[in-house]
Image (spheres, helix red, strand yellow):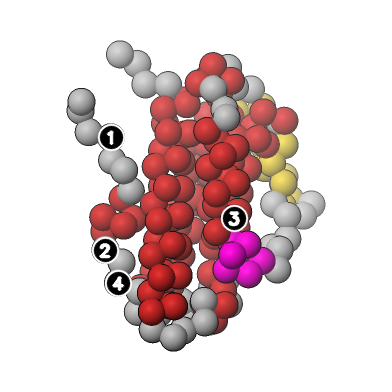
């Protein structure tokens, strides 16, 4: 059985988006139980030269649902980070999941071989869709999901590896 572009991208995005949603929920419960304001984490950075938690979550949505939508359109543009609060970031992840759940395998698999441009400002990077997803979006997606996870760990949220892995696909 050959593996499809849909399986490599959308199914994997959905698995990790589920874990991101889970660790956002678990973190919110932790913050409330410990008298912490969840808004304090929104601007938290691991290091001064890294972008904050808000950007990490926005990028998770951008490099998953945004990558698929942009691949369909032939253009993926990075928009400036919105000023989302913690609730807005949770909604962004929920919306990304909803958008990807609506995409069919046939839609994604039909994108193979098509041209797509990733544009940030005036800088344009040309790809074919499968190379864009596999060599650019998926690595960025996991980088930003991991960085968000690490920021929450830095804030004392009791997360573990299983929180990051999400619902793994075991043999039935």
For mark 2, does the 10 Å Cα neighbourhood hold few (<14), some (14 to 19), or many (20 or more) residues?
A: few
In the visual, does 131 lie left or right of 118? Answer: left
User: Which residue in the structure is indicated by mark 1?
Assistant: 169
**Residue 132 can be seen, yes or no:** no
One can see residue 31 in this view: yes
| Label 4 sits on residue | 158
- CA–CA distance in space, label 4 to label 1: 24 Å
| Residue named by callout 2 | 160
Mark pair 3, 2: CA separation: 23 Å
> Within 10 angstroms of label 3, few (less than 14), some, or many (20 or more) residues?
some
Marks 4 and 3, Cα distance to the nearest angstrom? 22 Å
Check residue 125 in the rendering and tell me which mark sits there, or answer none. none
Q: Are marks 1 and 3 in contact (CB under 8 Å)?
A: no
Q: What is the span of residues highlighted in magenta in the rendered image?
A: 84-89
Locate the N terminus and report the quarter of the image it occupies. top left
- Residue at 66%, 66% (x, y): give it: 84
Vertical placement of residue 106 versus 14, above or below: above
Counting residues from the N terminus, which is met first, the one under dot 4 or under dot 1?
Answer: 4
In the picture, measured across the screen, residue 12 lies left or right of residue 55, that is left
Label whose residue precedes the other's in the sequence (4 or 3): 3
Q: Secondary structure at mark 3?
A: helix
**Which residue is disc 3 drawn over?**
91
Most common secondary structure along the magenta stretch: helix
Query: Residue 38 or 57: which is nearer the viewer?
Result: 38
């Amino acid at each position: 059985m050959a593996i499809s572009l849909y399986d490599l991208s959308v199914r994997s995005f959905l698995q990790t988006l589920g874990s991101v949603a889970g660790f956002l929920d678990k973190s919110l419960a932790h913050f409330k139980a410990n008298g912490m304001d969840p808004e304090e984490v929104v601007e938290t950075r691991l290091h001064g030269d890294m972008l904050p938690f808000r950007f990490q979550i926005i990028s998770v949505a951008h490099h998953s649902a945004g990558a698929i939508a942009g691949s369909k359109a032939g253009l993926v543009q990075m928009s400036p980070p919105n000023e989302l609060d913690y609730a807005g970031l949770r909604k962004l992840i929920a919306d990304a999941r909803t958008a990807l759940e609506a995409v069919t395998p046939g839609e994604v698999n039909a994108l193979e071989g098509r041209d797509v441009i990733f544009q940030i400002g005036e800088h344009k990077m040309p790809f074919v869709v499968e190379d864009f997803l596999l060599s650019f979006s998926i690595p960025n997606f996991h980088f930003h999901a991991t960085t968000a996870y690490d920021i929450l760990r830095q804030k004392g949220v009791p997360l573990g590896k299983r929180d990051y892995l999400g619902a793994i696909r075991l043999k039935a």
